[in-house]
Amino acid sequence: MQWITIFQKELLENARNFKWIWVPLVFILLSVMDPLTTYYMPVLLDNFGNLPEGAQINIPTPPPPEVFWMSFSQLNVLGILVVLLMSMGLISAERKSGVSEMVLVKPVSYTSYVTAKFVSTLLLTLISAFIGLLASWYYVNLLFGEIPFSYYIGSVSFYSVWLMFIVSISIILNTAFRTPGLVGFLSIAALLLASAINSVFKTRIEWLPPQINAYIKGYLSTGSITDDLWITAFLTIGVTVILLVASVFILRKKELAA
Amino acid sequence: MAFVSVDQLSKTFDKTAVIKDLSFQLEKGKCVSLLGQNGAGKTTTLRMLSGLMKPTKGTISIDGASPSSDIRSFIGYLPQHPVFHNWMTGKEFLVYVGRLAHLSKKEATTRAESLLKQVGIEDAKNRRIGKYSGGMKQRLGIAQAMIHKPKLIMLDEPVSSLDPVGRREVLTLLEELKQETTVLFSTHILSDAEEVSDELLLLHDGHIVESGTMDDLQSQHDSTRIDLSFSKEAHAFEVPISQIDSVENVQREGNQLHIYAKNIENARTEILKLASEQDWPMTKFEVSRTSLEDLFMKVVNQ
């Protein structure tokens, strides 16, 4: 089947570029950084802080869910940057170089082409996020106190919806523009804009995609999945589907050669 | 009904018309060359035929399929500067595009193997494409265009970027291809077009200025003449030749005579008869025909 062919090609490409190694590694690094530095902060300050003799430092130990959430925040900045940089040439680079002239002149369905690329990138991103956050969950349990494993599964699952939305933003910009750098820049701009819109309107519309982060944080501290979280998740999935359909539409409208 | 028929095709980029009311037809099984200078609109025409670009107006119909249907399954296309996934091997790429063209994995593999052999890069099949030379990429490009046995194969400047050896090899390959399928290729090298194609389409400034077989074109623009060279001053032979009925005009240029005739066959017979009867010291006898180059220059300068 054609979809599988493109999907396999993407997986193979990611393997040959060693993305299956470095992306998970970066995610692990980003995820465990905050729990570790928070725990060892007093020790670090003691040894390297250059504090005057006899200074008293009293940092209250944050509760485990809060520490675990720090990992999500870290991924939300640097992890997402990695995802966007990794995916900015997904379609645009193929169009720019001219490979797509040869690939899309074969009877390839545009829907397969777009969705196979979307799923392969998402798969890499999600696996990296699951592994990275698992490492973080392990250290939080070890150093700060217990968080049930189900909380890890639940929070990362809902976080996956957010990541899905991010990849779809990159995909639609990939179909609209043929310069990877521009796609990367615009994706970051689009996410910043989405966050800004969310901050302005969150009192009136409570379920905009970026708001899902606040609900996941709430879920981690209370353990209950609120209706708001469900609604936001479903709306985010809906927006993602719309973005993908629009991407296929844009690509079909575009002239592949220029 | 013609195999490919192009009707009133136009393409405009930012208000500049690149293709203007282009109409032509291709017959099945022919090898046709699209000839023109750089910027004449060859690439744009091929891109529109392959569906990579949408015509501003006009229609393209291939093998009777409706213009809106997906023609991609029965065409093969080689871009002017083929770019591949450099991290793939030659064989992997062929299997990949074969599978995209709905071949089964087994079919795609067999087809890839046989094409790699046919285009002569079998030794390099497991090497990364990034390490291929220009000629090898060009051949891989032809192979990928052929992978799904298209009814029409379009090659954009298949030989222009190659060295003489590579050029010769690809031309030989084209000769083989035209046994199997309908070929349309663009070139600005006249001798290549003359060598492999059955028919020519001369494209200039976005429209077809001349088309037909080489013979058609020559008879249309006939300026056939006979050139004679002698080992001594040609003055003595001018008079008897000008007395031949079918000869219209004779020009002398040192040891050479240029003879323009109404009926070239008759003139030739008569001249050769005179030459053998009177034992002329002839060093050269040539019926020179309009070369494609003359024709090209003439058409382009019109």
Image (cartoon, helix red, strand yellow):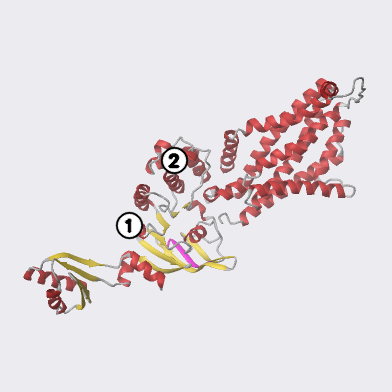
The mark found on residue B195 in the picture is 1
Which percent across, then down, holds residue B288? 25, 67
Q: Say which chain tag 2 marks.
A: B
**Amino acid beneath label 2:** Ala
Above or below for B33 versus A182: below
**Prevailing secondary structure of the magenta residues:** strand
| B234 in the magenta segment | no
What's the distance in space between the residues labelled 1 and 2, CA to CA?
28 Å
Judging by the rendered image, the residue that carries numbered circle 2 is: B112
Residue B291 can be seen, yes or no: yes
Which percent across, then down, holds residue A82? 70, 38
Seen at 10% across and 72% down, the residue is B274
The mark found on residue A48 in the picture is none
Tell whether A228 sits left or right of A124. Answer: right
**Amino acid beneath label 1:** Glu
Which percent across, then down, holds residue B82? 49, 49
* Dot 2: element: helix
Q: Magenta segment, which residues?
A: B1-10
Q: Say which chain tag 1 marks.
A: B
Q: Quadrant of the N terminus of chain A?
A: top right
- Which residue is nearer to you in this view: B106 or B171? B171
